[in-house]
Image (cartoon, rainbow, N blue to C red):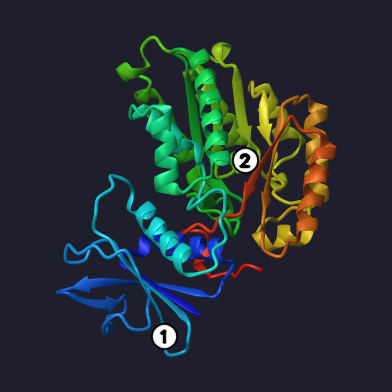
Amino acid sequence: MVKIFIDNKKYALDIKDLYTMLTGDRKVVVKAFEIKNGKMYLEDGIQIDGFKNTVYLIRKFEENFVLYHYNYDDENEPIFRLTYTKNYGEKDKNVYKRLLFDCLKKETKLLRPSWGTLTGIRPVKIVNDLKKAGYDKSQIDQRLINNYYLSNEKIDLITKISDNQEKAIKTLQNALSIYIFIPFCPSRCYYCSFYSNDISLTSTYATDYLDTLEKEIKETLKLPYFNGKKISTIYIGGGTPSSLDEKNLTKLFEIIKNNFDLNSIKEFTFEAGRADTLDEKKLHLIKNAGVNRICLNPQTMKDETLKTIGRTHSVAEFVDIFKLARKIGFDNINCDLILGLIGESETDMKTSLQKVIDLAPENITIHTLAKKRTAVLNQENIGFDD
C-alpha cells in the first residue's frame, strides 16, 4: 500500500483522489503531518523519524526546493517524497497535485487522463478567471497545459464553453441574476457537502429564517450596486426549498413578490429536487407564484441506490411527481443525475439516463460523484467499488 503524507490536511482528499485517478489504485493512505522546530509530527503528535517509508507532500520546508525523491520501503512498496517552496502565483492545491503528477509520470505506469490534474468541478471557471485577469488565448492555453496538464482537446472544449458563456452574459447587459438559499432538507444525502438542516428537526426555525431572509433582501437591494439594474433571473436553491411547508412556502413567494419586479424576470427557477417533499398543492403553489422552471432531481432511477444515498422516495414516486408537474403546466423541467454512485454499475447508470430521457425533460444535468470533505461519504469513510 502506498503511503502519502501531506503537510496540509485540507488537500489530503484531493491528493488521494488524484492518485487513484492517475494510477487506478485505490490502496493508498494519505495522512496529515506538521513541521515543528524542523521536525515532523503526525496529527496525533507522533514524531516521524526521517524520510523513511513515507511519501511527503510539503508546501514549504526550510526554503529548500526538492521536486521529488522515489524509492521502495522494506515491504517493496513505492514511496514518493515531495517538497516545494517556489511560488507560482496559484492555489497550493494545484501545486501539490502537479508535483504528485510529475512524480508518478516519471516513476510509474501512469494513466494519462485528458483532464490532467483536475479532479473537481467547474473547469471552465479557470478560463473565466484567467480572462478576467487579462490573459489572452495563447497565454490561457499555456497555463492550462503547464499548470493543469490538460490535453488540447479539453482546452479547446472549455475555452469554447467560456466563449459561449460570455456571449450569453453580454445579452443580459445590466441585468442581474439572484440566488436565494433555503437551507432545509428532509434528510441528508451521503454525497452532499452543502450546508443544510433536517427539516423534521428544525422546522421551527424556518419562519425565523424567512424573516431574516426578507431583511437581508431589503437591505441588499438598497446598495448602490443595484441602481439602474434589473433582475433577469431568480433561482431558489438549497438545501431543498420544497421541504418548506405550505405556510412557509407561501411566505417565501410573498417575500419575492414584494421585493422583486417579476415582470422583468426571464427565468424563475425553483429547486423542487425531491419527490418526497412535493404534492399537488405545493406544485400549484409554486406554479401560481410565477415559477417557470423547476428542478426535479432523481439522481438515480434505481430504488436500492436511493435508499443507500439517504433519499426517502422511490423511483415510482418520482415519476408520478414528474407527470403531475407536467399536468399542472410546467413546461421547463430539469432533472439531475449523478454518475458513479456507490454500488451502481455502468448498466445501472445507462438505465437511469434512459429512463429520464423517456420522460422528456427540457434539461438533463449530469454530475459525476465527487467525494467532498464535509459529506457523509467522506466523514464515514464509505469506500468506492472498483
Whether residue 82 sits left or right of residue 37 in the image: it is right
Question: Cα distance, mark 1 to mark 2?
Answer: 59 Å
Provide the residue designation for mark 1: 73
Q: Amino acid at mark 1?
A: Asp
Identify which residue, 330 or 337, lies in the foreground: 337
- With respect to residue 36, does 124 lie above or below? above
Task: Give the x, y percent position of residue 31.
Answer: 39, 73
Quadrant occupied by the C terminus: bottom right
- With respect to residue 42, does 386 lie above or below? above
Whether residue 46 sits left or right of residue 275 in the image: it is left
Q: Residue furthest top?
A: 228
Task: Give the x, y percent position of residue 135.
Answer: 36, 29
Residue occupying the point 57% across, 61% down: 111
Provide the residue designation for mark 2: 245
- With respect to residue 307, does 260 lie above or below? above
Task: Give the x, y percent position of residue 11.
Answer: 39, 60
Contact between labelled residues 2 and 1, with CB atoms less than 8 Å apart: no
Residue occupying the point 59% across, 66% down: 24
Q: Amino acid at mark 2?
A: Asp
- The first of marks 1 and 2 along the sequence is 1
Q: Residue furthest left?
A: 37
Secondary-structure class at tag 1: loop
Of circles 1 and 2, the one toward us is: 1
Task: Give the x, y percent position of residue 313.
Answer: 74, 53
Secondary-structure class at tag 2: loop
Identify which residue, 217 or 209, lies in the foreground: 217
Tell me if residue 376 can be seen: no
Q: Residue furthest front?
A: 106
- All told, the count of numbered labels is 2
Identify which residue, 161 or 199, lies in the foreground: 161
Q: Residues within 10 Å of mark 1 (few under 14, many from 20)?
A: few
Residue occupying the point 30% across, 67% down: 7
